[in-house]
Amino acid sequence: MFIETILEKAYAKLNISLDVISKRPDGYHDMRMVMQSVSLCDDVAVSLRDDGAVNVCTNLHFLPSDDRNIAVKAAKAFFSKLGRKDVGADISIFKRVPVCAGMGGGSADGAAVLRALNILMGKPFSRVELESLGATLGSDIPFCVSGGTSLAEGRGEALSELPPFPNCLFVIVKPKFSVSTPELFSKIDLVSVKYHPDTQGLVTSLKSGDLKGVCRRMYNVFEDVLPTKPNDIPKIKSFLLDSGALGAVMTGTGSAVFGIFDDENKARHSFNLLSERYREVFIAEPQGLISI
């Protein structure tokens, strides 16, 4: 009987920039994104079973506990790749990262399960192998395996590590509504994207540690095809900028929005005011690369 339990942090991700390059023959889209993991995280506890079953429980009653949960998919994919039908896992997830927010919460949980199982089973897989396995489960999982700061291309699985993000604070707001990812992708296919982020300029700013240069180049093409109602996203962006954020942008396909601050007092003041209007507001720091 296995008794050891591994505790992993499942760090949220933010899209500092997001560009859609083209639609691929396989139905996916080629993307070009600068992605950053942040200190806001879920707690994922994983222990092994000797009967081949995979069970998951969370603190949110509405999340599925069967094969629809990406943590379950990740565990089953791990054991399948390992060729072990006799081993299973018990997974417990304490959620903090908001769901349906564009912050990769589910993907981060799946990645944390892969890391935990890799430790429990004696590290049979390298970082690259875990990322490759994660790519079969979801586009954000390869990044979430190690986090840090990366240029992500392809579906998001082609990663190029970037220098650590400059010191700052992120104020993150998740409005009550969510945005349909398939709907935004279908809309982006119907329009000619007029503006694209200066991704190369952003990468150059990161390499020189120029936080203001990074913030000047933050952009998400999906903001151009958002539904007109509700219109909280532009309102939140404006509030963050008026509160002293160096830049503000929606992450992923939304609906979370974040601002980057180089002044802690301004960040906390903005956080306090936004907390009076929205239920899910967070302050986070850049999170570095996870050792595998």
Image (cartoon, rainbow, N blue to C red):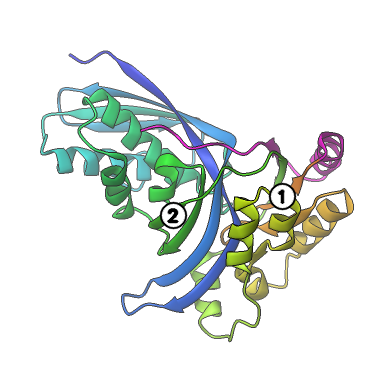
Question: Looking at the figure, which quarter contains the N terminus?
Answer: top left
Q: Is residue 192 above or below residue 103?
A: below
In this image, 63 relative to 218: left or right? left
In this image, 291 relative to 227: left or right? left
Three-letter residue code for mark 2: Ser
In this image, 108 relative to 228: left or right? left
Give the residues in magenta.
Answer: 263-292
Q: Is residue 115 above or below residue 164?
A: above
- Mark 1 to mark 2: distance in Å? 19 Å
Residue 254 visible in the current orientation: no
Q: Judging from the image, what secondary structure is the residue with disc 1 in?
A: helix
Residue at the outermost front position? 208
| Closer to the camera in the image, 212 or 30 | 212
Residues at circles 1 and 2 in contact by the CB criterion of under 8 Å: no
Three-letter residue code for mark 1: Leu
Give the residue pinned by disc 2. 160
Residue at position x 20%, y 33% in the image = 124
